[in-house]
Image: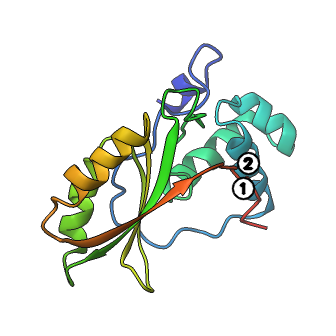
């Protein structure tokens, strides 16, 4: 099967990484070539394996094997498009902080994952328990999401909404 995928007419990169990786031994720490591959794919997840191989000065088969290992090890969790939310019709973004009932994180998270526009959910320490990033069509939709949907979740004790005026995606090389 590996030979079939390396053929010129086969897709260069696997479509997705496993949704829920199976427990596995600790991943090998990425070396300098792996870190460069990650940097290239972070900048453009559609970069072909051939182009990656040329940029890091390894064979196409080696680049393909390294990418697959990074996926198998859970270092690369998938490939996605970076979206301009406003141009995509989601002109309002907000961070919502939530205080939840103690020991209900997993239940609350499952419900928050189902919310329309939920983009990121984090369990945090500090003055609140959960930080939720949402994108909605407008302020009216945001108000409905917070007051009708989120505050109706039994595990949610309180919310605070922080309206986002401007966003910048930072693509620093975190592995350096």
Q: Distance of mark 1 from mark 2, alpha carbons?
A: 5 Å
Residue 99 vertical position relative to residue 143 in the rendered view, above or below: below
Toward the viewer: 93 or 169? 93
The image position of residue 80, as x and y in percent, is 54, 37
Using the image as rendered, state which of residue 65 and residue 124 is in the foreground: 124
Residue named by callout 2: 37
The residue that mark 1 highlights is 34
Secondary element under disc 1, as helix, strand or loop, is helix
Residue 116 appears left or right of 91: left
The relative height of residue 139 versus residue 99 in the rendered view (above or below) is: above
Residue drawn at 58 percent across, 32 percent down: 13
The answer to whether 94 is drawn above or below residue 135 in the figure is: below
**Residue shown at the point (19%, 80%) measured from the top left:** 101
Q: In this view, does 174 lie to the left or right of 156?
A: right
Colour pattern of the rendering: rainbow
**Quadrant in which residue 112 is drawn:** bottom left
């Amino acid at each position: 099967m590996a030979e079939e995928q390396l053929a010129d007419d086969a897709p260069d990169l696997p479509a997705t990484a496993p949704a829920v990786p199976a427990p596995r031994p600790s991943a090998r720490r990425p070396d300098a070539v792996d870190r460069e591959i990650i940097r290239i794919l972070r900048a453009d997840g559609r970069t072909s394996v051939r182009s990656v191989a040329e940029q890091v000065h390894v064979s196409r088969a080696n680049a393909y094997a390294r990418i697959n290992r990074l996926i198998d090890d859970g270092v690369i969790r998938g490939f996605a498009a970076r979206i301009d939310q406003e141009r995509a019709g989601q002109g309002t973004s907000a961070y919502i902080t939530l205080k939840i009932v103690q020991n209900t994180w997993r239940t609350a998270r499952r419900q928050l994952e189902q919310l329309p526009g939920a983009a990121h959910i984090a369990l945090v320490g500090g003055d609140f328990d959960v930080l939720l990033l949402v994108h909605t069509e407008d302020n009216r939709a945001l108000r409905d999401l917070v007051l009708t949907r989120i505050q109706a979740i039994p595990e949610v004790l309180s919310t605070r909404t922080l309206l986002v005026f401007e966003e910048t995606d930072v693509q620093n090389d975190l592995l350096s």
